[in-house]
Image (cartoon, helix red, strand yellow):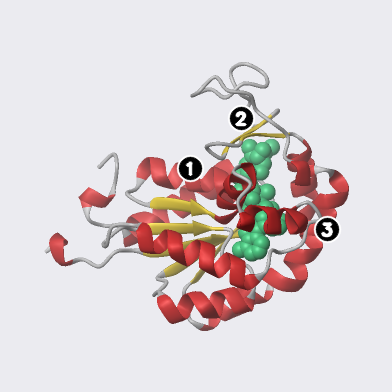
């Protein structure tokens, strides 16, 4: 009785540059899930110069976390806008215990995918990342270069290097991850919903993530290429 199935709610976690955006784009390509990236949402708020964007920008450019209340309001309001029954995948939220607790008060989370990628690999990757800000699409000079340098494949619009991908800010973001976000793994491990994938290459991690998702999203309607 697929009409009775409950929506699937998932989180993708991992340090900055671990491939959350890259893996998420493969998930939405192959499965019926809505991807919500907290970083993409914040960058959209900054671009539109909203009060929330102006507030958040100070934190992003220094590699710190934006305040919990701002993030919880932003994400929960987005989730409320989704039609009921939507399968969702949160990328980059929650990132603190406070955020995780607020989320768990409002929403059931079925599983957490954790990308465990060494910090050395990350520093190398982020220096070669190019981003299409309006869509959040990411490229990398070596790994998945755009067809034309500096131009988004789909829209033909310019790509930019994110302000916070400067090496000093990357180090700060990794520190923030270690002190504030890493403890969340334990929060979800205790609830028996944490699934970790280790590696230095997304192409090696992805088949394992995909195989896991196929065991959860078993209804053919939830698979794009079934
Ligand atoms: P974001 O935007 O969530 P981060 O730092 O968590 O930022 P980021 O940088 O977006 O995460 P990612 O999505 O994990 O990284 O990784 P990605 O973009 O897919 O891949 C990184 C690069 O590596 C890309 O160029 C990709 O092409 C390449 N790549 C992928 N796989 C491979 C591979 O196998 N090989 C190679 N060579 N390359 C590969 O958050 C930004 C800021 O917003 C605030 C914070 O200030 C945060 O710092 N924020 C929040 N604050 C508070 N609470 C929250 N919940 C917040 N969320 C965001
Ligand atoms: Mg990302």
Within 10 angstroms of label 2, few (less than 14), some, or many (20 or more) residues? few
**Towards the viewer: 156 or 113:** 156
Q: At numbered mark 2, what does the secondary structure look like: helix, strand or loop?
A: loop
Which residue is denoted by mark 3 in the rendering? 172
Is the C-beta of the residue carrying label 2 under 8 Å from the nearest atom of ligand 1? Answer: yes
- Who comes first in sequence, dot 2 or dot 1? 1
Is the C-beta of the residue carrying label 3 under 8 Å from the nearest atom of ligand 1? Answer: no
Q: Is residue 23 left or right of residue 141?
A: left
Is the C-beta of the residue carrying label 1 under 8 Å from the nearest atom of ligand 1? Answer: yes
- The single residue placed furthest to the right in the displayed view is 168
Q: At numbered mark 3, what does the secondary structure look like: helix, strand or loop?
A: helix
**Can residue 19 be spotted in the picture?**
no
**Towards the viewer: 199 or 225:** 225
- Count the numbered circles shown: 3
Residue at (63% x, 67% y) in the render: 95
Which residue is denoted by mark 1 in the rendering? 25
The answer to whether 118 is drawn above or below residue 7 in the figure is: above
Distance Cα–Cα, label 2 vs label 3? 26 Å
Residue at (57% x, 24% y) in the render: 152
Residue 34 placement (x, y as % from top left): 39, 51
Q: Quadrant of residue 118?
A: bottom right
- Who comes first in sequence, dot 3 or dot 1? 1
Q: Quadrant of residue 89?
A: bottom left
Residue 57 placement (x, y as % from top left): 72, 53
Within 10 angstroms of label 3, few (less than 14), some, or many (20 or more) residues? some
Distance Cα–Cα, label 3 vs label 1? 26 Å
**Disc number at residue 144?**
2
- Who comes first in sequence, dot 2 or dot 3? 2
**Towards the viewer: 81 or 90:** 81
Disc nearest the viewer among 3 and 1:
3
**Can residue 81 be spotted in the picture?**
yes
């Amino acid at each position: 009785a697929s009409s009775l199935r409950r929506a699937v709610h998932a989180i993708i976690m991992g340090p900055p540059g671990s491939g959350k955006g890259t893996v998420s784009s493969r998930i939405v390509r192959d499965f019926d899930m809505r991807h919500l990236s907290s970083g993409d949402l914040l960058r959209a708020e900054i671009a539109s110069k909203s009060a929330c964007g102006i507030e958040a920008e100070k934190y992003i450019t220094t590699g710190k976390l934006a305040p919990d209340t701002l993030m919880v309001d932003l994400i929960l309001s987005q989730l409320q806008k989704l039609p009921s029954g939507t399968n969702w995948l949160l990328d980059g939220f929650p990132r603190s215990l406070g955020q995780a607790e607020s989320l768990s008060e409002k929403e059931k989370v079925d599983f957490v995918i954790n990308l465990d990628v060494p910090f050395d690999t990350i520093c190398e990757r982020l220096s070669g990342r190019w981003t299409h800000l309006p869509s959040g699409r990411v490229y990398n000079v070596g790994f998945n270069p755009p067809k034309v340098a500096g131009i988004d494949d789909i829209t033909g619009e310019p790509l930019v290097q994110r302000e916070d991908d400067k090496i000093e800010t990357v180090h700060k973001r990794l520190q923030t991850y270690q002190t504030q976000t890493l403890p969340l793994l334990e929060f979800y491990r205790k609830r028996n919903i944490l699934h970790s994938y280790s590696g230095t290459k997304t192409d090696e991690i992805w088949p394992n993530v995909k195989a896991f998702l196929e065991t959860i999203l078993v209804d053919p309607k939830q698979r794009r290429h079934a």
